[in-house]
């Protein structure tokens, strides 16, 4: 059974559809981040973020690399 859930992004308050039951179709699928950053996001926000916020956070990582 596919589970799709409407969520509110805890970072920007945007509404998005989480497709945890079909993760390959989820809006977050394909956004690669280091495990440490994923753990930090989970600790800081406690839930899934929308694609826009995930992309912004990933891009901010690029700016930190020396």
Image: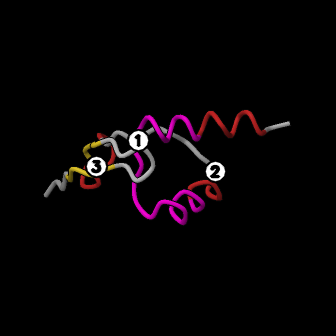
Which residue is denoted by mark 1 in the rendering?
A: 29
Question: Residue at the location (39% across, 43% down)?
Answer: 50
Give how far across and how far down residue 29 sits, in percent.
Answer: 41, 41
In terms of sequence position, does the residue under pointer 3 or pointer 2 come before the other? Answer: 3
* Secondary structure beneath label 2: loop
Q: Quadrant of residue 14?
A: top left
Majority SS type along the magenta span: helix
Q: Label 1 to label 3, Cα distance in Å?
A: 10 Å
Give how far across and how far down residue 42 sits, in percent.
Answer: 50, 62
Res. 34 mark: 2
Q: Quadrant of residue 2?
A: bottom left
Give how far across and how far down residue 48 sits, in percent.
Answer: 40, 54
The mark closer to the camera, 3 or 2, is 3
Colour style of the rendered protein structure: secondary structure
Local crowd size for mark 2, using a 10 Å CA cut-off: few (<14), some (14–19), many (≥20): few
Which residue is denoted by mark 3 in the rendering?
A: 18
In terms of sequence position, does the residue under pointer 1 or pointer 3 come before the other? Answer: 3
Local crowd size for mark 3, using a 10 Å CA cut-off: few (<14), some (14–19), many (≥20): many
Give how far across and how far down residue 38 sits, in percent.
Answer: 56, 56
Query: Magenta includes 2?
Result: no
Residue range highlighted in magenta: 39-57
In terms of sequence position, does the residue under pointer 2 or pointer 1 come before the other? Answer: 1
């Amino acid at each position: 059974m596919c589970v799709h859930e409407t969520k509110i992004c805890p970072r920007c308050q945007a509404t998005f559809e989480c497709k945890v039951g079909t993760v390959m179709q989820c809006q977050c699928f394909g956004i690669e981040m280091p495990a440490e950053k994923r753990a930090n996001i989970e600790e800081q926000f406690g839930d899934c973020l929308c694609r826009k916020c995930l992309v912004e956070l990933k891009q901010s990582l690029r700016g930190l690399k020396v």
